[in-house]
Image (cartoon, rainbow, N blue to C red):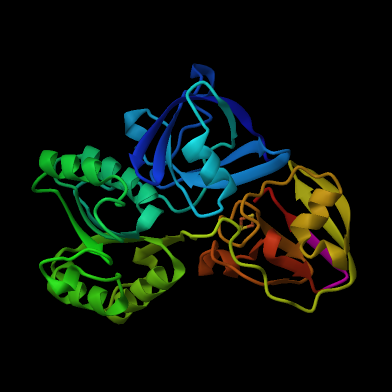
Amino acid sequence: MSKFYKIPVAKVEKMTPDSVVITFDIPAKLKNAFAYKAGQHVIVKTQIDGADIRRTYSFCAAPCEGEFRISVRHIEDGVFSGFANNTLKAGDVLELSKPLGAFSLDPKPGATYVGIAAGSGITPILSMIRCVLAQDDDSRFFLYYGNRDAEHTMFRRELAALKNLHMDRFSYQLFLTRQAVDNPFWGGRIDGEKITQLHKTVFKGLDVAGYYLCGPKSMVDDTRESLIASGEPASNIHSELFFAGEDGPKRTAAKAQAKAKINVIMDGREVQVDYRDEHGSILEAALSSGLDVTFACKGGVCATCRAKVKAGQVDMGINYGLEPEEIDEGFVLTCQSVPLSKAVTISFDE
Ligand code: FES
């Protein structure tokens, strides 16, 4: 169930010309409910001009620091990102879900990790870096981070400070698309060719415990493919997509039933929902019948609407949020799914 908590904003700090860091003041009695793993996100909900706005943002602090911070980059025409960058101030109250998401890192002692990020994809990776460096004196993190120029690079100062503190355990390299660089290899976007080169020259010798990728789809796909082609097992590569737009992609057309009965299992109860063509997704059908189902992006990205198909058949249009193993186990993104059989049973409790 999508329970939201009213949480006061403690601080809003400008980080780059187009981004802010928001620190939340989580009340002591909710600290346990808000315990999170490095890499996880929250759904932020608020009303703007009468509309109910929900967005997902990853924590940029690390759980071990006991802080709750997110960062928001202003996207052109972005309703929430514009509000957060121009209007939001300390003392305002936003509604937050509990921390969510499977893109997370539980550092193992003495392990080495590689992060590859672009733009605001750095946010969950930064939380992971802080966690790994705090783990023990032998854990290491190597970061490769793409941006347009140094001025718009989020967390540039924090990364430099971490590097100064942990010279032998943390290194990072920027790729810049719109600023001159000494070595052409570090100019332009992160792509598969560059990752193949880095694998040959750096990663191969590191005994990497996990690769963590976060950024736009093209970068994440290219990077994943080139790591696999270089011999890395897919199970060692973890990723989360970041979209420049706020609405995400639209689902593709699928041959859905015009009408179907959906048995929705939620909080231990089973409720029957009538699906009709105009709903367009199982999530919308469930919301229309008044069920308090969790969702955020409605674009197949955040995976907060994940549920397991227990009976019947569904078709999922777009999926950027589920891992192949989750799909094999029968999980779908309900915002992207339509019924292919007259009756479907779907559980949000799994
Ligand atoms: S609501 Fe985000 S994937 Fe469905």
Q: Which residues are magenta?
A: 341-345
Residue occupying the point 73% across, 41% down: 267
Instruction: Describe residue 32's horizontal placement relative to residue 148 as left or right.
Output: right
Instruction: Describe residue 139's horizontal placement relative to residue 168 as left or right.
Output: right
Q: Quadrant of the N terminus?
A: top right
Is 294 situated above or below 174?
Answer: above
* Image coordinates for residue 222, horizontal then vertical, percent: 37, 75
Residue occupying the point 19% across, 68% down: 186
Q: Quadrant of residue 226?
A: bottom left
Q: Quadrant of residue 332?
A: bottom right
Residue 340 sits inside the magenta stretch: no
Residue occupying the point 38% across, 44% down: 38
Is 31 situated above or below 210?
Answer: above
Magenta segment's dominant SS is: strand
Q: Which one is nearer the viewer's eye here, 30 or 47?
A: 47
* Image coordinates for residue 209, horizontal then vertical, percent: 27, 59
* Image coordinates for residue 53, horizontal then vertical, percent: 65, 43
* Image coordinates for residue 251, horizontal then vertical, percent: 67, 70
Residue occupying the point 84% across, 50% down: 288
Seen from this angle, which residue lies furthest top?
A: 28
Instruction: Describe residue 325's horizontal placement relative to residue 22 as left or right.
Output: right
Instruction: Describe residue 81's horizontal placement relative to residue 192 as left or right.
Output: right
Q: Which one is nearer the viewer's eye here, 245 or 224?
A: 245
Is 114 situated above or below 296?
Answer: below
Is 3 situated above or below 315?
Answer: above
Q: Quadrant of ligand 1?
A: bottom right
